[in-house]
Image (spheres, rainbow, N blue to C red):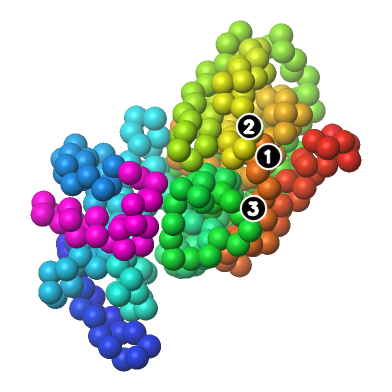
Amino acid sequence: MVKERKVKLKNKNGDTLLVLLREYRKGDEEGMIACIRDEYGETYFKRDFYDPEYIKSESDNHHIKFLAAQTEDKEIAGMMILKQFYPEESMCEIASQIFRKKYRGYGLALPFFQYGLELLKARNYSAAYCLPVTFHHITQVLLYRSGLRAAGFILNVFDLDKIIHSYKNGRNTKHSQAIQIMALDKRDAGTLYLPVEHQKFAGMVYESLGVNYSFHEEKMISEWGESDMPDYSDMTFSNDAVQSNLEIRVLLVGRDFKKRLLNLHRQFPLCRKQTASLFLNCNDCHAVKAYEILKKMGYFFTGLKPLCSEKEYMVLHNPGKVQIYFDDYMVSSEFASLLLYVKYCYERSQNMVFGLGKDG
């Protein structure tokens, strides 16, 4: 059992801060909400977190473990959550680390992350998972020090007209997330059906995670046609109307894949700020066929979501009409090389869309 922990911190002026890191207790709700309001006002995308009863309920049913950083004066200086996704996925997400502004500069983030990771490792999760922001790189760096590794990006998730924070966004109108992973109980990614063009990228990611994996030979993949596919795809989707963000998960590719996708695009047209991200099961032998379809529809490769369930996923994105300014992202040195690769994929897809280049 991981116990609560006291940490003594100091800022650059020599001021000290004594903080108790612990799990949530009933009565912490208003202090946690105050942390959110101090940074985001009323615009935090997890709108339920403004409701004290929701915090109590999620804690009681064990969907979310809330953590608190408490000062000697019993004030909540910061909050963080550990979120599980059973039965759909088997990882645990480290999320929503938010501090009151007056307690910044003491270096509280790293020991808080490390405390959360200890709690997480005490359970049987396939991986530790985090989606750090790309408008600063602090979280990316601290999680790298804690053992998490870069795997890719989920682009254009949040409409920046709908969310405020104390950092700069540059020219981007939607906010993206990075994907950071640590392998825990899942140590084998199985056979991956990935386009040859992305196998080097994927190999670097899986090597960094220290897990087993193999690629299926492209020549054998190309022998399969639609006649070998199941009739129906296994797909799920959700659309956040506030953030104009469509998320699609493809567990199994069937002959109706393109038709299903076109229907989704009709239901949620990629106009104004509407964007779509797609998670494609790359343990499915028809993933490469689906990738070729997606590429022609304006999707491009943005990385991997590894070790989070029985299935491995490659991540693709369709920006619709939204312009992406990758140079305005704030990323760590580890993520920088991945971002350059994703930027290349984006520029190539834009050339295809506007007829300036050849398809792959």
From the viewer's side, name the closer residue of 123 and 32: 32
Q: CA distance from mark 2 to mark 3?
A: 32 Å
Say few, some or many: other residues with alpha carbon within 10 Å of mark 2 (under 14 / 14 to 19 / 20 or more): some
Q: Is residue 41 magenta?
A: yes
**In the image, which residues are magenta?**
25-47
At which x and y percent is residue 226?
Answer: 72, 13
Residue 91, position in %: x, y?
Answer: 39, 42
Pick the front one: 51 or 181: 51
Q: Are marks 2 and 1 in contact (CB under 8 Å)?
A: yes
> Label 3 belongs to which residue?
204
Asked whether the viewer can see residue 116, the reply is no
The residue depicted at 37 percent of the width and 50 percent of the height is 44
Quarter of the view holding residue 100: bottom left
Residue 218 seen in the current view? yes
Residue plotted at (78% across, 19% down): 223
Label 3 Cα crowd, 10 Å radius (few <14 / some 14-19 / many 20+): few
Instruction: Locate residue 258: give its quadrant.
Output: top right
For residue 321, the mark is: 1
Q: Is residue 171 left or right of residue 346?
A: left
Tell me the residue that label 2 is attached to. Answer: 270
Q: Amino acid at mark 1?
A: Lys
